[in-house]
Amino acid sequence: MARDALVAGIDVGTTKICTIIAAQQTDGRLEIVGVGLTPSAGLKRGVIVDREDAIAAIRSSVELAQGQAGVELTSAWVGVTGAHISSVNVTGRTNVAPGPAVCEEDLARAVQSARDAVPLPQDREIIHEVVRGFAVDGETGISRPVGMSGRRLDVELHAVTGTASIVENVERCVADAGVAVARRALEPIATGTAVITDAERDLGVILIDVGGGTSDVAVFLGGSIAHTSAIPVGGNHVTRDLARLLRVSFDEAEKLKCRYGRALPESVNRDESVQVQLADGSESEHVPLHLVAEIIEPRLEEIFSLVRGNIVRSGVYEQASAGVVLSGGGSQLPDTAGLASRVLDGLPVRVGSPRGVYGPIEAASNPIYATGIGLAILAAREGATAVDRPAGRPTVLDRIRDWWERVLPRA
C-alpha cells in the first residue's frame, strides 16, 4: 500500500456512529487523519428500526471524517453486531490435487468444505469467517500449508452467523448514506484487532466490548478467534436504571452516569452528592453519589455474569489464562475493571486502548474508537484504497505542511 493510500472503517452502533479514515505509514502503523463521531439514531441493539434516521446519522459521521481528512469516502469496512450473532467452529477436508504440493485451489476446497458444515437455517447466513489453522495428513498447527507435501488437507474454520435481513439492512443504510461497503466484519473481531496484543492472543484472552445496546464477546486462543457472541445488555440499560429509579430524563441520567458514575459503591464517599433535574422539570434535588453507584453496580454485574455464562457454555472459559480486556463506552466508568474481575473469578482485567495507531490523542487512545480503528486496520491489511482525493483539495497533512512552511523561519 502506498504511503498516502487511505482506508476507512465505520462502526454502526446503538449509541454512536464512528467513522475512521486512516493512512498507512512506511513503518506499518496507521495515522488517523479523519474521525467522525456522532450520536446514533434509528438503531436498537444493533438492529435498524428507522432507516431514514439511521442513514442521516451515518451520513453525518462520514461527513465529519471527510471534512477532517479532506477526502471523499467512497468505500469502507463496516462493523456488524447484535444479539442475533452466534458462532461455531467447524472443520473441512479435501484431498490434495495430484501434484508436488498443496496449492491455493486445495485451500479453497477445504474452506468451502468447512463452510458447507455450518448449520444455516433459511434466515441466517455466514457474515464473517476466520481460518484457525490447517492440518496436512493429520499434522496440526499449520498456518501456511501452500507448498507443503501431503495427500489430505484439513482446515478449522471459525464461522460467525447472523440474521441475513438484519445485516443487509445495516449495509443498505451505509450504502444509502453514500459509502459502498467494501467488506463487513464482526465488531468484536475488529475491536480485538485494535486492543489485544499478540501475546494475549497466544495465551488466551477474553474481550468484552460493552456498547450501548449490546455487549460483544470474543475469546482468542492459540493466536486465533475461538468464540464470538453478543449479549443483549449494554450501557444504555445502566442509564435507563438511573433514569427510572431517580425519576430523571434519559439524557440527565446519561450525563450523571458519565460524569459521576462508578461501578463500585464502596469507592464512593457517602457524603458526596450531586444536584439533578427531575423528569417533570418542576424541581431539582440532591442525589447521593453512593446511591448512583448502588444503581450502576447490579446492572454491570449482570452484564459480566451473562458474559461468563456465555463463555462457560462455549467450553473455552478455563483456557483464557491472559485474562480479560474491556473496551467500548461502557468500560469507561471507574472501577469497572475491578467489578469485572470480581465476577469473572478473579481473572486479571484491563481496559484496552487502540494500539499501532497515532493521530488525534482522543481517537488514538480512547476505547470508544477501538472498533472503528480495528475496522480500518483490517482494511489496511487487505491493501484496499477507500477514498478519492479531489484534485486541488488539500488534506489535513497538506494543511499542516503548509502551516509549518509559513511559520518556520527560512534558512
Image (cartoon, helix red, strand yellow):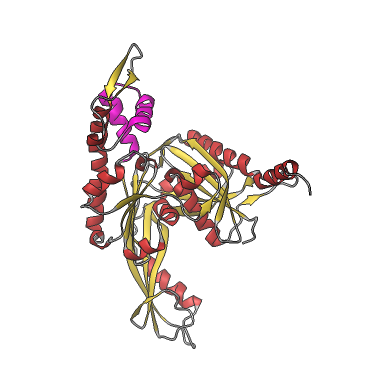
Q: Is residue 239 magenta?
A: yes
Nearer to the camera, 239 or 90: 239
Left or right relative to 383: residue 259: left
Residue 119 can be seen in this image:
no
Q: Position of residue 88 (x, y in %)?
A: 32, 61
Nearer to the camera, 89 or 50: 89
Q: Magenta span: helix, strand or loop, mainly?
A: helix
Among all residues in the image, which is located at the extreme front?
A: 411
Left or right relative to 329: residue 184: right
Q: Is residue 384 magenta?
A: no
Among all residues in the image, which is located at the extreme right?
A: 411
**In the image, is residue 387 above or below residue 276?**
below
Q: Position of residue 386 (x, y in %)?
A: 60, 52
Q: Quadrant of residue 134?
A: bottom left
Residue 8 can be seen in this image:
yes
Q: Residue at x 37, y 57 (%)?
A: 160
Q: Quadrant of residue 367?
A: top left
Left or right relative to 38: residue 138: left
Looking at the rendering, the stretch of residues picked out in magenta corresponds to 234-261
Q: Quadrant of residue 406?
A: top right
Q: Residue at x 73, y 44 (%)?
A: 408
Nearer to the camera, 193 or 120: 193
Q: Position of residue 65 (x, y in %)?
A: 58, 42
Nearer to the camera, 109 or 7: 7
Q: Quadrant of the N terminus?
A: bottom right
Q: Residue at x 33, y 81 (%)?
A: 138
